[in-house]
Image (cartoon, rainbow, N blue to C red):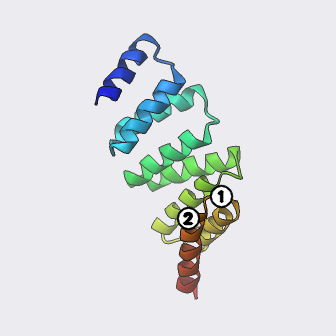
Amino acid sequence: MQRINEYERILEINPKDYEILVALGNVNYDMGKWKNAVDSYLKALAIDSTDVNVRTDLGTCYKQMRLFDLAEREFKIGIEIDPKHAKVHYNLGVIYYEKGELDKTLGEWEINYSLEKDPYFKEIVRKNIEQIKQALQ
């Protein structure tokens, strides 16, 4: 709460402080305060709409709020901005999975797997891909 109060004081002075808006969004995200995180991320994206990390976090908040269409939109915009951003592909795959669109899930997760640098996460994705392939057979 102390960081939130500190960030809000800074935003009273400079409401368009991009870094603080993102930081406030991240703190709320980490606390599971999805609506508050969404508010901060939207304000940040109004300043810089090209930040794929912020857009991915925004989409993830929407997913947590079960607003799948909004999440899908954010992830697709993220992919338009940076088609090689691994995490946005993975998260779009999660949305497709939630919607029962396994073919699309598989496609996004395969793209993620080809782009993913983190070996631990890459192994998780590989296992997820195997499960999807089995489900599709």
Q: As drawn, is 114 to the left or to the right of 5?
A: right
Asked where in the image residue 7 lies, by quadrant, the reply is top left
Which residue position is annotated with label 1?
117
- Res. 31 mark: none
Outermost residue to the top = 13
Amino acid residing under circle 2: Tyr
Left or right? Give the position of 46 relative to 29: right
Q: Position of residue 21 (x, y in %)?
A: 47, 27
Give the structural element (helix, strand or loop) at label 2.
Answer: helix
**Residue at figure coordinates x 57%, y 80% from the top left:** 130
C-alpha distance separating marks 2 and 1: 9 Å
Please tell me whether residue 37 is drawn above or below residue 78 in the rendered image. Answer: above
Q: How many marks?
A: 2
Residue 54: image quadrant is top right
The percent coordinates of residue 114 (x first, y second) are 70, 64
The answer to which of 19 and 100 lies nearer the viewer is 19
- Name the secondary structure under disc 1: loop
Please tell me whether residue 67 is drawn above or below residue 46 in the rendered image: below
Residue behind mark 2: 120
Position of the C terminus, as image quadrant, is: bottom right
- Taking the spot 52% from the left edge, 26% from the top edge, the residue there is 19
Q: Quadrant of the N terminus?
A: top left
Which one is nearer the viewer's eye here, 33 or 113?
113
Q: Label 1 sits on what residue type?
A: Lys
| Pointers 2 and 1 in contact (C-beta within 8 Å) | no
Q: Position of residue 50 (x, y in %)?
A: 64, 36
The x, y position of residue 84, in whole percent, is 71, 52
Decide: few, some or many residues near mark 1? Use Cα within 10 Å; few <14, some 14-19, many ≥20.
few
